[in-house]
């Protein structure tokens, strides 16, 4: 009998359960998609760091499931409270609390089962979509990915866990609530907001705090990125920012309506007083929740944006870090004996083909004339000065499209580190071999062909008498795309097969390799960014989903009272259109409050992302940042509109009274 | 005197197919300007249905309803809302004050919906509050007031737009007898001093005795009609009582 009753209730309460259904279905879809990615055989083959990626994603999934369970507990208690009069009646008719719980659990179980089915169906498509993104990020050709039984069973397990956790909250409520409260409702005494001006001050102070902490954090980061300074007080600044976000929303929710109500001209217009009073209670009662939701959504925005910005900058960063397809760095201090490069080159020839090889050298004097003018020297971290003959420099730069330079009695400093830019050599005359060399320029924008902090490019005759410490080679390969991972493994075998490699104490697997293969690094970074982007997308989607679900459920939980109020307004002559407008303003303001800041955060995030990329001289990636943040903001807006529209339509159907 | 309300041959059916209930069966009557009319009858006699069709909340199946010279049955929904807002005042059994609004905001809400400027609406609020003796309560919320005070506030809200017709649906239903009598005196004052035309539905003979005229409904038809004329309230009450007894004794009589 209870099952029949529960089944009928579900049919009757479909409107109320819609938001719950959407949330469970979308959560299941996300869990299913991510679980299948974790256990995908297609990816396991390619993701080199498969195990660590898998573990990271597993931890994320479990953490997110806990959050979902908490939110769904919240959601179920809303559904319960909406129908307390009905449950009170059941109790007065002689049902036990256990019967009541059975009915409610059967109802939610039915909804969860249907949502599970819908979620698995949607998740199947979502999985293929996410796999397409992963494949694209990993630069693999897309093929329909196989579903894994483990991914499926884990999704079911997590959903059951979420359902059981949510059920406990319902059981606790039904066990403790009195019949009187169920029938008559808990006597809620609406208190007006006291001292709205103080709350407004809190809003203002929090806003100032947010701007100050955000600004200082960006400034600190800027110093770190452009000057190599240490990041100081970042934790305090971030903490201050998060606290300010909560304070800002709590203050705004408490003060905004109260201040509007003090404006007689504004409030006397149409249904403004009614809407403001409707909002007053709900905003004030949920002030802290708004802060928490705004934080969740801000995390979602920042995380997603930075994961995409990182991806956008990846290609340029790769070319900046590894301008040649393959580079061989040979340092005599690390390797005592001469290395048989021919053996390694035959391996390179086999995997990628050698189109061109450009040797270049680095010399040392054992002095620190140039380093003495840098911060490293002051910090006792300076090595000896390094020199490159200008002919070698021109030779290694020419294939990269750099114009050859001429140095006659001059020297040029070339570096990649911003600290180099701080030093001043303009008045320094360098003496070597009886000759004098004057300052030509200091450049930080040349392609990186050395791991040195900086080197000094000098006329060829200037290196006479210096010791050659590096005989490196840059290679252009025949093939643009080749299996970098395989080549790296093959070269590693060659290097470590060589007796007394000079790389003391290092094992083959984790030891340094003197070859830098761009395709190897590209594949490595693809793995990292694939995990980063998909992980960030998943977490952000769940955070947004939960925030929207809470807002929607909060809106719907008061529909009973709203219905009576709109009915009175209808009788007083508030037409259907005016009721719709009032409801729209009421619900839209409620939804909008925690959403504005995360959306606005897209602007500083975009600015900062662009700034960081420009510091790293990644202009093309920097130009893409506004597009990325725009897409992220649009994605959020779509999810927001989906939930808002569902909530508004349900509310409209329930409360707006027509003729 | 001009007729404010003209009901002609109004019929109202509920349901469809084989299960049809005839709630109003060809009712016709008029209410003149400044008149205080009560409608009485047993449960299911059609009192509330009649009030609902007059207040434009429900539609008639046939017949015409004219208020202040305007034919309601032919008006569109938007115009009906405007008509309710501008020409009708409502007083309900459960007060129907909005719990989220202060008493002042409740009373002035119909003027806000008209988009009247706040200086004028504040002036009207002051007068209405004084007339109904709720000035002290304007800043309070409904839950902070007694039932009688709430109903007086509802009266002030009904009168603030200077409506052509005030419709009251069992206004004393939620009040104790002392508050109920006080409310009826307020109704008389609204009618006599402020010139309000009132149409009140009640099943209480004592409350009906405050009206100038009482219409008795039975099975959706006007069964009888009692006029006060020059009689005092006690005589009016006795006549209502005896009419009720003749009607079938189903109406409460005190």
Image (spheres, coloured by chain):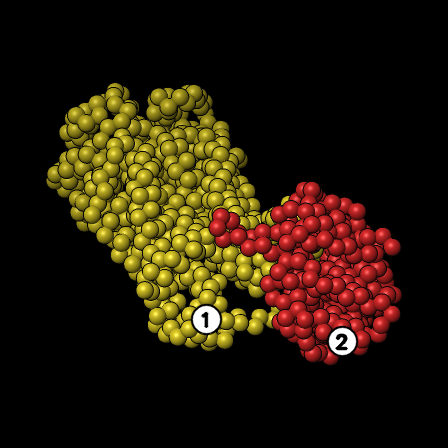
Chain colours: A yellow, B red
Q: Would you place residue A526 above or below residue B47 in this image?
A: above
| In the image: residue B150, left or right of residue A299 | right
* Quadrant in the rendering for residue B75: top right
The percent position of residue B127, horizontal first and vertical second, equals 85, 63
Secondary structure under the numbered disc 1 in the rendered image: helix
Q: Which residue is mark 1?
A: A88
Residue at position x 43%, y 53% in the image: A14
Secondary structure under the numbered disc 2 in the rendered image: helix
* Quadrant in the rendering for residue A169: bottom left
| In the image: residue A406, left or right of residue B182 | left
Evaluate if marks 2 and 1 touch, with contact meaning CB atoms under 8 Å apart. no
* Quadrant in the rendering for residue A577: top right
Residue closer to the observer: A22 or B143: B143
The percent position of residue B114, horizontal first and vertical second, equals 76, 50
The percent position of residue B2, horizontal first and vertical second, equals 85, 52
Residue reaching furthest to the front? B246
Residue at position x 63%, y 55% in the image: B24
Marks 2 and 1, how far apart in space?
44 Å
| Residue B69 in view here | yes
Chain letter of disc 1?
A
User: Which quadrant is home to the N terminus of chain A?
Assistant: bottom left
| In the image: residue A286, left or right of residue A4 | right
The percent position of residue A634, horizontal first and vertical second, equals 49, 39
Chain letter of disc 2?
B
Residue at position x 34%, y 25% in the image: A396
Q: Nearer the viewer, mark 2 or mark 1?
A: 2
Residue closer to the observer: B181 or A414: B181
Q: Which residue is mark 2?
A: B238
Residue closer to the observer: B210 or A160: B210
């Amino acid at each position: 009998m209870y099952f029949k009753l529960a089944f009928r209730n579900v049919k009757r309460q479909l409107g109320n359960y819609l938001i719950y259904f959407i949330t469970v279905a979308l959560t299941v879809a996300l869990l299913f998609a991510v679980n299948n990615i974790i256990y995908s055989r297609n990816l396991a083959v390619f993701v080199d760091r498969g195990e660590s990626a898998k573990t990271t994603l597993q931890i994320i999934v479990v953490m997110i499931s806990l959050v979902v369970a908490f939110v769904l507990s919240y959601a179920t208690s809303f559904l319960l409270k909406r129908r307390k009069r009905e449950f009170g009646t059941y109790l007065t008719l002689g049902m036990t609390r256990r019967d009541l719980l059975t009915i409610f659990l059967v109802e939610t179980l039915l909804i969860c089962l249907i949502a599970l089915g819908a979620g698995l169906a949607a998740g199947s498509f979502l999985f293929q979509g996410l796999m397409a993104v992963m494949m694209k990020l990993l630069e693999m050709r897309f093929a329909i990915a196989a579903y894994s039984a483990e991914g499926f069973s884990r999704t079911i397990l997590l959903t059951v866990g979420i359902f059981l956790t949510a059920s406990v909250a319902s059981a606790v409520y039904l066990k403790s609530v009195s019949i009187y409260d169920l029938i008559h409702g808990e006597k809620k005494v609406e208190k007006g907001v006291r001292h709205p001006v103080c709350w407004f001050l809190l809003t203002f102070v929090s806003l100032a705090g947010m701007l100050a902490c955000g600004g200082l954090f960006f400034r600190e980061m800027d110093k770190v990125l452009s000057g190599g300074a240490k990041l100081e007080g970042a934790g305090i600044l971030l903490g201050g920012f998060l606290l300010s976000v909560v304070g800002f929303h709590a203050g705004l929710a408490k003060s905004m309506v109260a201040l509007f109500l003090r404006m007689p001209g504004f409030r006397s217009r149409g249904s403004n007083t009614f809407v403001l009073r409707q909002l007053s209670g709900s905003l004030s009662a949920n002030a802290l929740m708004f802060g928490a939701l705004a934080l969740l959504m801000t995390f979602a925005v920042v995380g997603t944006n930075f994961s995409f910005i990182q991806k956008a900058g990846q290609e340029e960063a790769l070319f900046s870090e590894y301008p040649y397809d393959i580079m061989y760095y040979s340092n005599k201090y690390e390797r005592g004996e001469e290395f048989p490069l021919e053996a390694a080159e035959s391996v390179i020839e086999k995997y990628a083909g050698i189109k061109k090889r450009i040797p270049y050298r680095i010399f040392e004097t054992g002095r620190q004339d140039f380093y003495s003018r840098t911060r490293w020297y002051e910090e006792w971290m300076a090595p000896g000065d390094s020199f490159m003959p200008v002919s070698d420099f021109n030779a290694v730069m020419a294939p990269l499209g750099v114009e050859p330079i001429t140095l006659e009695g001059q020297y040029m400093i070339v570096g990649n580190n911003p600290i180099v830019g701080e030093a001043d050599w303009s008045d320094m005359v360098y003496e070597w071999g009886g000759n004098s060399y004057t300052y030509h320029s200091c450049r930080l924008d040349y392609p990186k062909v050395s791991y040195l902090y900086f080197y000094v490019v000098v006329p060829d005759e200037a290196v006479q008498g210096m010791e050659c410490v590096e005989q490196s080679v840059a290679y252009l390969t025949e093939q643009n795309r080749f299996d970098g991972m395989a080549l790296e493994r093959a070269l590693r075998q060659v290097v470590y097969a060589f007796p007394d490699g000079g790389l003391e104490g290092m094992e083959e697997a984790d030891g340094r390799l003197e070859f830098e293969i761009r395709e190897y690094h590209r594949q490595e970074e693809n793995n990292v960014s694939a995990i980063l982007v998909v992980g960030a997308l998943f977490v952000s989607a769940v955070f947004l989903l939960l925030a929207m679900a809470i807002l929607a459920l909060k809106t719907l939980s008061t529909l009973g009272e709203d219905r009576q109020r709109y009915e009175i307004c209808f009788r007083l002559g508030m037409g259907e259109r005016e009721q719709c407008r009032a409801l729209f303003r009421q619900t839209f303001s409620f939804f909008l409050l925690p959403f504005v800041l995360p959306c606005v955060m897209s602007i500083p995030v975009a600015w900062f992302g662009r700034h960081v990329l420009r510091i790293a001289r990644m202009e093309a990636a920097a130009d893409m940042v506004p597009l990325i943040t725009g897409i992220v903001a649009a994605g959020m807006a779509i999810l927001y509109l989906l939930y808002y529209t569902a909530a508004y339509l349900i509310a409209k159907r329930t409360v707006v009274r027509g003729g | 005197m001009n007729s404010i309300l003209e009901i002609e041959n109004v019929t109202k059916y509920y349901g469809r197919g084989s299960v049809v209930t005839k709630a109003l069966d060809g009712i016709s009557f008029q209410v003149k300007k400044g008149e205080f009319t009560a409608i009485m009858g047993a449960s299911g006699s059609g009192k509330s249905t009649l009030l609902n069709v007059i207040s434009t909340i429900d539609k008639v199946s046939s017949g015409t309803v004219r208020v202040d010279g305007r034919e309601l049955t032919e008006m569109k929904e938007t115009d009906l809302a405007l008509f309710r807002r501008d020409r009708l005042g409502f007083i309900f059994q459960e007060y129907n004050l909005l719990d989220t609004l202060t008493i002042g905001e409740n009373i002035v809400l119909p003027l806000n919906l008209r988009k009247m400027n706040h200086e004028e609406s504040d002036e009207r609020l002051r007068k209405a509050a004084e007339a109904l003796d709720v000035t002290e309560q304007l800043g309070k919320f409904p839950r902070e007031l007694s039932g009688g005070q709430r109903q007086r506030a509802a009266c002030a809200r009904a009168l603030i737009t200077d409506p052509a017709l005030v419709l009251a649906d069992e206004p004393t239903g939620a009040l104790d007898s002392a508050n109920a009598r006080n409310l009826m005196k307020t109704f008389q004052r609204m009618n006599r001093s402020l010139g309000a035309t009132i149409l009140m539905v009640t099943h209480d003979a004592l409350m009906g005795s405050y009206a100038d005229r009482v219409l008795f409904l039975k099975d959706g038809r006007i069964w009888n009609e009692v006029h006060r004329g020059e009689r005092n309230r006690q005589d009016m009450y006795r006549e209502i009582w005896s009419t009720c007894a003749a009607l079938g004794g189903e109406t409460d009589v005190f």
